[in-house]
Image: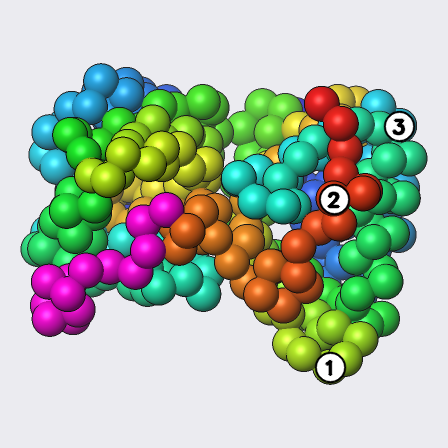
């Protein structure tokens, strides 16, 4: 933990993450994007075709968020269910409320472990139903493969 | 109990679980526990009560997995009555196939007892290695 991280009380981090997810529940991802550190890392756990570590905000946007938007109709919506926070870590249990471009419901269950530093998201570890990902989304598209 | 005390309790329990001893975990599960296996797959369901959990989930897993299964904790996060444990399974099926799942386990405690568990893990791996959960054993409601 850096000195900057300790400047932020747990309640601050929880409040920040609560706001980001309250907006994601309204399909507004801008507060999330504003909070991503340049060296932000997103890790999708497991053995699925999307499971890997995305290193850096630019890679997360290009190689994860963009391919995801290709699969999902309209804007992505994720509804927080419960937040659990200690120090620089905030855990968010959440439920997706999404539809694929070919009309299938994609309502995944998420447990996100988010590490913050100085109010910015530094690392996001996502646990979700990887089997649902494969069945409904399928593997990332060709565009994502070319970027990786 | 405080968040720190709850965290210490789970750390003690997982020190044993990581060594292949699940007894302290079982000893701290309340009779009225509910365990939710999250997601939308064959394993996804809620086990209500310790008896159902031990018989229908842990009992079934024991028929599939070799003895000596370990779950190694990586990180603990405690807040009020909740403790989150990120962990890595180190298991093998009875046929010798590795089953090393990634877990995020949420525990809610009350007076030193586990009253609620929610499991998030790689269910693509679960179904690939362990197969689907038997429909005949699926919990109702």
Q: Is residue A138 above or below residue B56?
A: below
* Residue at horizontal 53 percent and vertical 40 percent from the top: B39
The residue lying toward the viewer, choosing from B18 and B136, is B136
Q: What number is the disc on residue B135? A: 2
Same chain letter for marks 1 and 3: yes
Image-quadrant location for residue B81: top right
Q: Secondary structure at mark 2?
A: helix
Magenta stretch secondary structure, dominant? helix
Mark with earlier residue (1, 2): 1
Dot 1 falls on a residue whose secondary structure is loop
Determine crowd level at label 3: few under 14, some 14-19, many 20+ residues with C-alpha closer than 10 A: some
Label 1 close to label 3 by CB (< 8 Å): no
Residue bearing the label numbered 1:
B96
Q: Earlier in the sequence, mark 1 or mark 3?
A: 3
Q: Distance between the Cα atoms at labels 1 and 3? A: 33 Å
Residue interval drawn in magenta: A136-148
Give the vertical position of B99 relative to A137 (above or below).
below
Closer-to-camera residue (A98/B22)? A98
Does the segment drawn in magenta span residue A141?
A: yes
Query: How many C-alpha atoms fall within 10 Å of the one at disc 1: few (<14), some, or many (≥20)?
Result: few
Please state the chain letter of the residue tagged with numbered disc 1 in the rendered image: B
- Residue A36 vs residue B63: left or right? left
For marks 2 and 3 on the same chain, the one whose residue lies earlier in the sequence? 3
User: Would you say residue A48 sits in the magenta stretch?
Assistant: no
Q: In front: A66, or B136?
A: B136
Q: x, y (%) of residue B130?
A: 68, 63
């Amino acid at each position: 933990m850096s000195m900057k991280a300790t400047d932020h009380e747990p309640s601050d981090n929880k409040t920040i993450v609560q706001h980001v997810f309250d907006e994601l529940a309204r399909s507004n991802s801008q507060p999330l994007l504003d909070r991503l550190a340049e060296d932000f890392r997103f890790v999708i756990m497991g053995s699925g075709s999307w499971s890997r570590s995305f290193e850096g905000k630019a890679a997360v946007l290009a190689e994860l968020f963009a391919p995801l938007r290709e699969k999902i109709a309209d804007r992505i919506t994720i509804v927080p269910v419960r937040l659990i926070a200690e120090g620089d870590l905030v855990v968010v249990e959440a439920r997706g409320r999404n539809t694929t471009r070919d009309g299938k419901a994609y309502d995944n269950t998420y447990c996100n472990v988010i590490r913050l530093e100085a109010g910015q998201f530094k690392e996001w570890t996502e646990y979700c139903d990887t089997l649902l990902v494969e069945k409904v989304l399928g593997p990332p598209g060709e565009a994502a493969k070319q970027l990786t | 109990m405080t968040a720190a005390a709850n965290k210490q309790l789970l750390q003690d329990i997982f020190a044993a679980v990581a060594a292949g001893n699940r007894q302290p975990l079982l000893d701290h599960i309340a009779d009225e526990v509910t365990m939710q296996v999250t997601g939308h797959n064959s394993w996804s369901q809620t086990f209500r009560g310790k008896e159902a959990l031990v018989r229908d989930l842990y009992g079934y897993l024991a028929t599939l997995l070799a003895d000596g299964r370990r779950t190694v904790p990586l990180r603990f996060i405690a807040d009020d009555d909740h403790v989150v444990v990120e962990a890595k399974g180190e298991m093998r099926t009875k046929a010798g196939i590795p089953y090393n799942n990634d877990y995020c386990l949420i525990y809610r405690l009350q007076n030193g007892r586990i009253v609620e568990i929610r499991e998030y893990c790689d269910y693509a791996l679960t179904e690939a290695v362990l197969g689907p959960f038997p429909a005949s054993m699926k919990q109702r409601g």
